[in-house]
């Protein structure tokens, strides 16, 4: 066997572990409204730079759920290489979600970048989430490169969309790139613009190590894998590192860069994006936003400015089988690593036993988490009616934060309740202003302002209670606007409100999982519709089931599920009437005893009945 020369070995080593000067590194993300073609455009960029061979659409959307629904749920980081003016550049791209429920994923991606591609659909124009993501990027001092996508479509209006972008960004017309994720038009222009316009990362390779963790995943064989961006310093394989906020120390078993697969490296320097594997098994030891530094000669302070996510919607998640409680806890912890915006804490319910109160960023987020628990961890769960958190003030002026109607104090002890409000922004065409205003006013919205963006497109700003929009607002908005309205919102603090706790009783027993907090003006109508819906969903028993809606001790609505009756007198085809009466009396006693000891099974559909009351 021939021995390789020292020069050949060194050349092979350099080929695998290519070192890039910081001025040849560009970190950027793609931001846009949902369904504006971010992931398809990312495919063309990867194809053009020969990073991967694209065999199917949306290569970065690797989750089955993402492919089925055609949406991006997780941010995906990948490294590309591109030659420009005879020099080799490394480009770290992060493809982000577009739905408002996953805006936290976008904020984390922005924290790891110096620039962003703002992608706008040539046929749909600027929409609500486009503006929201743009402001987020501007707040982080990112360089914005505007791109008009889908220019090959017959319905494309690039000139009109250019006018909207110029009005929004104040940029020059020649700075806007026209592209198509389908045909590959404009891909080279985008890559060149990334190198020309986006600044190289700033940092000192010789300073103490500072790495920002922007994501993490759980691998059943290798433990927790953390993704990071190096702001300062150099990290090498085998270094002893510590996580700043938790104070835990680890050995960097493997470090590397993120291509379609993880590619190990001997060292990574300031400006790079990569991953670290150090055999961490406990999910609580890795926090998104934490700082990685060296044990010896590390940095003195953590990286500032990274915000925790604030859940907007809360719901109880319970295992169908009580024995699966610990399995559910473990599954939620692993899921939380991959989805840092999910929060949970234990709670119990009289109807459902032990479970968790989970915080989500929105209803789609809640639906995705439930689906991922089922697919990835084989956990069948019951999810209760979603609600928001309220500030409840007692007679002594003390404030309690309540996430669950079951945690409400007695009505006699409450002084007042404050509910969360949001600043809602709806962008639509002038044809649908009337129905949208009617919908918002029906949800207790207050019109703040209305401004025309361009032509017949208008942006309407409302101040609305969050509790009114978490159930069915988005679906109704899409229906009445035939899909032409886009919606975005931001928290706007708490305001006092006349809220009451609405209880649902089955045969006089309250079902705490069906309790809701609602405005007093909606309570009577809501209670009546809940009873009617439950009457359809609860199966008939051998005894009558009384379904009642109550506020405190006052019953405001009632429905009855009639009993299933067996004809016990069928065998009496003759003889004295006392024989029949005797059998009927015996049946009556049996029914009475059954009503006392029988329990009513509430199907899973009933817990989400409020979502489909209309």
Image (tube, helix red, strand yellow):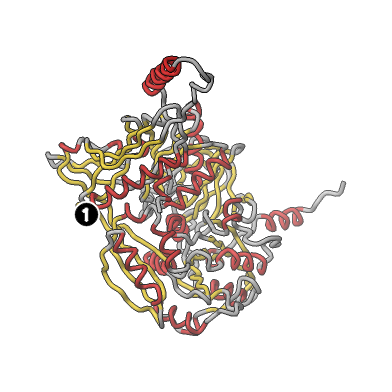
Image x and y of residue 593, in percent? 38, 18
Point out the image quarter for the C terminus. Answer: bottom left
Q: Quadrant of residue 435?
A: bottom left
Q: Where 455 falls versus 600 (above or below)?
A: below
Q: Quadrant of residue 487?
A: bottom left
Regarding residue 329, the answer to whether it shows in the image is no
Residue at 28% in and 62% down? 445
Please name whichever residue, 112 or 414, is drawn nearer the observer in this view of the structure: 414
Image x and y of residue 64, in percent? 61, 51
Residue under numbered circle 1: 495
Q: Residue furthest front?
A: 575
Residue at 59% in and 62% down? 20
Q: Where 246 falls versus 186 (above or below)?
A: above
Please name whichever residue, 88 or 489, is drawn nearer the observer in this view of the structure: 489
Regarding residue 324, the answer to whether it shows in the image is yes
Please name whichever residue, 21 or 549, is drawn nearer the observer in this view of the structure: 549
Q: Where 89 falls versus 388 (above or below)?
A: below
Mark 1 neighbour density, 10 Å: few (under 14) some (14–19) many (20 or more): few
Image x and y of residue 38, in percent? 55, 66
> How many labels, in total?
1
Residue at 51% in and 52% down? 234
Q: Residue furthest left?
A: 396
Q: Secondary structure at mark 1?
A: strand
Image x and y of residue 246, in percent? 40, 39
Q: Where 564 falls versus 251 (above or below)?
A: above
Q: Is residue 453 left or right of residue 83?
A: left
Q: Residue furthest right?
A: 1
């Amino acid at each position: 066997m021939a021995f390789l020369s020292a020069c050949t070995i060194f050349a092979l080593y350099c080929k695998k572990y290519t070192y890039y000067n910081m001025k040849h590194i560009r970190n950027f993300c793609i931001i846009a409204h949902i369904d504006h073609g971010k992931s398809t455009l990312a495919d063309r960029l990867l194809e053009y730079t020969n990073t991967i061979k694209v065999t199917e659409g949306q290569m970065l959307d690797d989750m089955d759920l993402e492919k089925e629904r055609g949406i991006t749920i997780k941010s995906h980081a990948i490294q590309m290489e591109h030659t420009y003016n005879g020099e080799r550049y490394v480009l770290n791209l992060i493809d982000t979600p577009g739905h408002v429920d996953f805006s936290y994923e976008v904020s984390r991606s922005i924290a790891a970048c110096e620039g962003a591609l703002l992608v706008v659909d040539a046929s749909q124009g600027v929409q609500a989430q486009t503006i929201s993501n743009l402001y987020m990027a501007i707040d982080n001092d990112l360089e914005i490169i505007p791109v008009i996508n889908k220019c090959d479509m017959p319905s494309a209006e690039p000139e009109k969309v250019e006018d909207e972008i110029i009005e929004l960004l104040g940029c020059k017309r020649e700075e806007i790139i026209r592209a198509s994720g389908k045909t590959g038009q404009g891909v080279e222009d985008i890559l060149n613009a990334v190198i020309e316009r986006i600044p190289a990362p700033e940092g000192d390779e010789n300073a103490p190590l500072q790495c920002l963790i922007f994501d993490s995943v759980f691998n059943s064989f290798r433990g927790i894998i953390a993704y990071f961006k190096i702001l300062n310093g150099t990290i090498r394989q085998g270094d002893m590192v510590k996580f700043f906020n938790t104070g835990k120390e680890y050995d960097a078993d493997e470090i590397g860069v993120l291509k379609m697969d993880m590619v190990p490296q001997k060292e990574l320097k300031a400006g790079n994006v990569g991953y670290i594997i150090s055999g961490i098994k406990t999910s609580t030891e890795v926090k998104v936003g934490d700082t990685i530094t060296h044990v010896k000669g590390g940095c003195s302070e953590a990286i500032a400015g990274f915000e925790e996510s604030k859940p907007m919607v809360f719901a109880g998640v319970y295992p169908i089988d009580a024995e699966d409680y610990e399995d559910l806890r473990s599954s939620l912890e692993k899921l939380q690593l991959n989805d840092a915006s999910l929060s949970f804490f234990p709670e119990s319910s009289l109807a459902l036993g032990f479970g968790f109160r989970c915080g989500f960023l929105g209803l789609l987020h809640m639906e995705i988490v439930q689906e991922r628990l089922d697919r990835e961890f084989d956990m069948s769960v019951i999810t209760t009616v979603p609600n928001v958190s309220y500030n409840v003030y007692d007679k002594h002026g003390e404030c309690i934060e309540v996430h669950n109607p079951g945690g409400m104090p007695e009505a006699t002890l409450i002084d007042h309740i404050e509910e969360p409000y949001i600043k809602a922004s709806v962008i639509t065409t002038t044809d649908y202003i009337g129905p949208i205003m009617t919908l918002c006013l029906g949800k207790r919205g207050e019109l703040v302002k209305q401004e025309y963006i361009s032509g017949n497109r208008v942006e309407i700003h409302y101040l609305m209670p969050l509790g009114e929009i978490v159930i069915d607002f988005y679906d109704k908005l899409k229906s009445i606007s035939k899909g032409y309205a886009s919606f975005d919102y931001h928290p706007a603090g708490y305001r006092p409100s006349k809220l009451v706790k609405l209880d649902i009783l089955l045969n006089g027993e309250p079902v705490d999982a069906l309790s809701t907090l609602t405005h007093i003006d909606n309570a009577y109508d809501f209670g009546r519709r809940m009873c009617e819906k439950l009457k359809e969903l609860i199966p008939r028993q051998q005894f009558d089931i009384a379904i009642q809606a109550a506020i405190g001790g006052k019953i405001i609505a009632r429905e009855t599920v009639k009993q299933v009756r067996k004809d016990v007198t069928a065998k009496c085809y003759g003889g004295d009437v006392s024989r029949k009466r005797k059998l009927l009396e015996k049946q009556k006693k049996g029914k009475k005893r059954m009503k006392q000891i029988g329990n009513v099974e509430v199907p899973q559909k009933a817990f989400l009945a409020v979502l489909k009351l209309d």
